[in-house]
Image: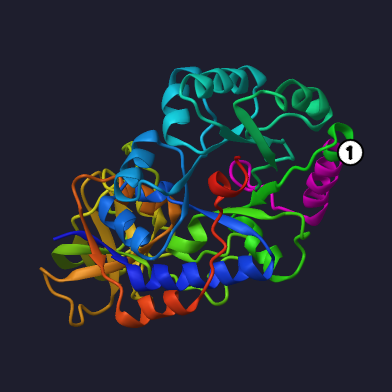
Amino acid sequence: MNRVLIDVNALSHNINVIDRWMREHNSSWTLVTKVLCGHHGTLKALHELGIKSIGESRLANIRAMKEVSPEIETWYLRLPYFSAIPDIVELGDVSLNSETEIIEEINMEAKRQDKLHGVIVMIELGDLREGILPGTLVEFYNRIFKLPNVKVLGIGSNLGCLAGAIPNEDQLMQLVLYKELLELKFGHTLPLISAGSSSLLPLLLEGKVPGTINHFRIGEAVFLGTDLINGGTLRGLRNDAITLEAEVAEIKEKSLVTMGENGVSTPFESIDDNDFTPGQRGYRAIVTIGQLDTEVAGLTPMNEDYNIAGASSDLTVVNIGDEQGDLKVGDVIKFRPNYGATLRLMNNRYIDHIIIPPNKDSLKQKEEAGEDSFSRIADEEIQ
């Protein structure tokens, strides 16, 4: 049986650690739950851990979270588009925006629904994803800040999400200066600079994030503990919240180098980068997970002596060494998935998703943490 294990104890640990970092920085934060693909059991566990603010890019997933926690604050992280605006206003408290026409339509829809909708104006700072060009900021803001059913909560940016640009202090200081410019120009306060993500946490831990950057949208660091800048795991976090168990269907001693000419085109990119010599043999295990199920290149066997040789749509071949050891058919091989592999696994209807519930110590730790720093923009800023 193949299954994904979601350890709520590890999630609770990472949430508490990151929440402490946020409080020390006088910042609020929103938990980005996109990777869960609306998995009800995990959303329920997060609610029970005290999560008050989530960020999502799929409206169906926001609706799923609202079923678990109707009062939770929701940030819509995908760029709004015309056909989705009625649902975005209904389900989302805050959205990230870069088009005046879209914001004007949000304002009209919010009026129809008798709501006040929060907006973060996204600014392009080098990652080449969404965001207005800095030179158009004053004109852009002038068109939207007086809309009656839209509350401009601040400015923001995405760094390291598309082009892989590493966030730096100069980019963050640009945002601080843009906020000050708008406040001086228009004579009122912008509560937030929402520019923090998991990729910004290494800078935060080094004390290099300006205090004016006061809202973070964090997902990967919570679920995987990843240090996106330096590699490995961020200090203090756990990397064992998500585990894949894949069942072994075959174990055989085989050649480790393909026999004959290699000329047949395969539908998937090669994974094996091992430098085996012709005639070299070893034991190979086949597990019943393939490219249909996940991004196999994003899986790392937890046994450091194992490595992935390759995968088809339904099966993955794992080199397990010169000896079979204790592994036998019917056992499982455990893997740590990266973000891309986790996303595919959580969206996979062919695999079981198992919640490992929190123990008493985890719940006690959450209770003792005191006041958290999760964003409550809907209650505090949208008045």
Q: Is residue 145 above or below residue 259?
A: above
Query: Does the image show residue 154?
Result: yes
Residue 323, image x and y in percent? Answer: 23, 80
User: What residue do we see at 68% from left, 32% from top?
Assistant: 131
Residue 336, image x and y in percent? Answer: 37, 65
**Which kind of residue does numbered mark 1 sit on?**
Leu
Other residues around mark 1 within 10 Å, as few (<14) / some (14–19) / many (≥20)? few
Q: Is residue 57 above or below residue 87?
A: below
Nearer the observer, 324 or 358: 358
Image: magenta residue range: 160-182
Nearer the observer, 204 or 343: 204
- Is 373 positioned to the left or the right of 353 in the image? right
Q: Residue furthest left?
A: 330
Colour scheme shown: rainbow
User: What residue do we see at 42% from left, 46% from top?
Assistant: 34
User: What residue do we see at 36% from left, 83% from top?
Assistant: 361
Q: Is residue 111 above or below residue 302?
A: above
Query: Does the image show residue 128?
Result: no
- Is 252 positioned to the left or the right of 306 in the image? left
The residue tagged 1 is: 184
Quadrant placement of the N terminus:
bottom left
Nearer the observer, 89 or 383: 383
Residue 99, image x and y in percent? Answer: 64, 23
User: What residue do we see at 40% from left, 48% from top?
Assistant: 71
Q: Is residue 292 above or below residue 151?
A: below
- Is 255 positioned to the left or the right of 63 in the image? left
Number of numbered callouts drawn: 1
